[in-house]
Amino acid sequence: MARHTLILGMGNPILTDDAVGVRLADDIGTALSDHPDVDVMAECSVGGLNLLEHLEGYRRVVVMDAIHTEGGEPGSCYYFKATSLRPTANLNNIHDANFATALALGRKLGHDLPTDDQIHIFAVEVLDDLTFGSELTPELTQAYPGFRELILAGIRRILTEPILGNQEAAHGAHDRTERWPHGDSSTHPRGGPRPVTGLLRQPRPW
Amino acid sequence: MSRQIIIDPITRLEGHGKIQIILDDEGAVEDCYFQIPELRGFERFVEGRPIEELPRIVTRICGVCPASHHLASAKAVDGCFGGQIPPLAAKLRDMYYHAHYIHSHIAHFYALAAPDFVVGPGADPAQRNILGVVAKVGREIGEQVITARSQAQRIQTIIGGRSTHPVWCLPGGVSKGLTSDELDEIKPMVANLAGFVTFSLQLFRDVVLGNPEYVDLILNGPYTLDLHNMGLVDENNAPNFYDGLVRVVDFEGQEICKYAPDEYADHVAEHVEPWTYLKFPFLKQRGWQGFVEGPDTSLYTATPLSRLNVAERMATPRAQEAYEEMFSTLGGRPCKALLASHWARLVEMVQNYEMLQQYCDDPEITGDQYRVVPDRITGEGVGIVEAMRGTLTHHYTCDENGLCTSANLIVGTTNNNAAIHMVTKKVAATMIKPGVEPDEGILNLVEMAFRSFDPCFSCATHSLPGRMPLKIDLIQGGEIVHTFQRDAS
């Protein structure tokens, strides 16, 4: 039986701001504890092919992660769907298949995975993800309550949206243009994510 | 005209590997700098913490090889508590690690190496990925890849409780043993892995060795370096991934040194360059000689190929056959063709599955003497294992209360830093000629070079969107004249 929604926190809990996705997933998972159809994996530090088994069977996935963009302001939030990652399916990761490639491979092999349209990604601009430390930088600590509430509100709205079964969606909604509350501004005009140029920046508030 | 190019190592390109190639006035390659981001502050982070916590903390250093850090750290912590663990604990740790090796090597071979050879080194980059491999070899093989990875992961989970971020190793042994029921679950998975590894080796023979162009590329392309080789060996000079002595042989196969982990500081030193934070380890007794190959070099590689180059034999029979086949095809041992590391990974996996089979048949493996609680603090320990990406050293000291006072790590990729730098320059010199307009083909060739090392550039492996971080700037007369970059657009 298909499971419903998985909230996934990505990051390293002892790498300063890289921990922000893990913290958010933990916090937001607690805030959503009244949703029995929501599972939370607060610390997911695997990528590539290993992700497939974590996503298997879910109809919707919400990922929280850290992101670095050129000139980005720490604490800025970004939202996009896995549809935006499709162009990266042709690129290699360092050690493994990247996220989009792993998803494409999993679907090709018949794994029961959520459609790209139902993989929602929230990313927070970070300042330091190279220094070992168990605390966020002061800048991110200060901004944390604000973006936490924004993301929580965004997830609550996502949870109200109906989702098709994976098979139906695969035939119908798989390639449709994504729509998020204020239009399609989170999507690069050519459909791909451009975190380094800041084109994914979502005007606040959502 | 000679120019000095100063590159601020603080510059960070969102996790990119940044390569700057300096051209002379005629347009030929004069020098090359390979910069990568490095995680920092680990030593300070762990100082003052209970030393027994370190094996649990270090798994967060790297999301790709957490087991390697866990085991090296556990061995260093064992040393801080007197160094004794029961034989069963060593067997279980070793068994766990063989499964981890298979898990890692399968991903590298099918997701990163096979695209170059199965799909083809000259193929469109858009096709050179695991999807292209599956399109070529069939969906069924793709399913087998996923199944084998999952089984290797499951074996780690059964033995150590977790596959990622293990917390299983404790001072003096491990926290749990293996039950008969658990062993029964492992056995059929090991049998399947044996079949899958055998298939993968045959695929390599058919696709790579069956193509003279590929063999020529491996042996005669720019991907060769006359550097020394490092790897961990057992008492018979066979590869041992978890324990043993570090052996170094020169590029002609003569042994330079062989040392116990706690002697590492007598044999390895680290050189610092002003343009990168990442250090360059070298053989201390030869002194820093610069980025040179041949008899004068003090540089070494620590890769899957290096491990087989330092080994005089494999530890298991089928692996021995695969090892002999490899070196007879490549013209003998040692082999200096860096791309042969892809083949070496397959040979290593043969030893991995055979060792797993041996442990499955070992009547002592389900015993209950898997830990001796330490009764003293001796204050210092060095743990060395062979991470998939090279020899991994953890060195800790602690005070009389068991609180960490220092930690020094030499991670796998750091050993290969100089080699990656040198081969990149070599590839660049092959591709960039005076009067010839360079093209993006250089990206593919450089990728192939450093992919053979499977380098750990950064542990933020989850970073969105998960693309190969690579940017190449060609600089002439102090100006950037070309930029090539892998990008999503």
Image (cartoon, coloured by chain):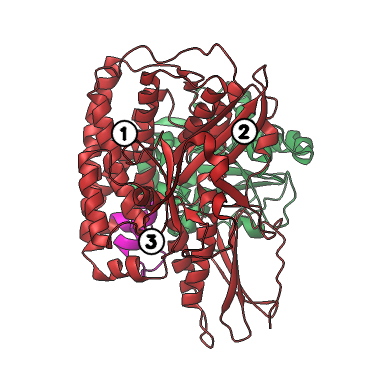
SS at mark 1 in the image: helix
Question: In the image, is residue B127 part of the stretch drawn in magenta?
Answer: yes
Q: Position of residue B78 (x, y in %)?
A: 52, 23
Q: Are labels 1 and 2 assigned to the same chain?
A: no
Q: Image quadrant of residue B327?
A: bottom left
Q: Are labels 2 and 3 assigned to the same chain?
A: no
Q: Nearer the viewer, residue B7 or B292?
A: B292
Q: Nearer the viewer, residue B217 or B470?
A: B217
Which of the two discs, 2 and 3, sits closer to the camera? 3
Residue B120 vs B167, above or below: the answer is: below
Q: Amino acid at mark 3?
A: Lys
Q: Which residue is mark 1?
A: B151
* Dot 2 crowding, Cα within 10 Å, few <14, some 14–19, many 20+: many
Image: magenta residue range = B111-134
Is residue B426 among the parts visible in the rendering? yes
Q: Report the side of B81 relative to A58 (left or right).
A: right
SS at mark 2 in the image: loop
As measured in the structure, the alpha-carbon distance from the residue carrying label 1 to the one carrying label 2 is 27 Å
Q: Position of residue A30 (x, y in %)?
A: 61, 23
Q: Which residue is mark 3?
A: B336
Q: Amino acid at mark 2?
A: Pro
Q: Chain in red?
A: B
Q: Chain of mark 2?
A: A
Q: Image quadrant of residue A132?
A: top right
Which of the two discs, 3 and 1, sits closer to the camera? 3
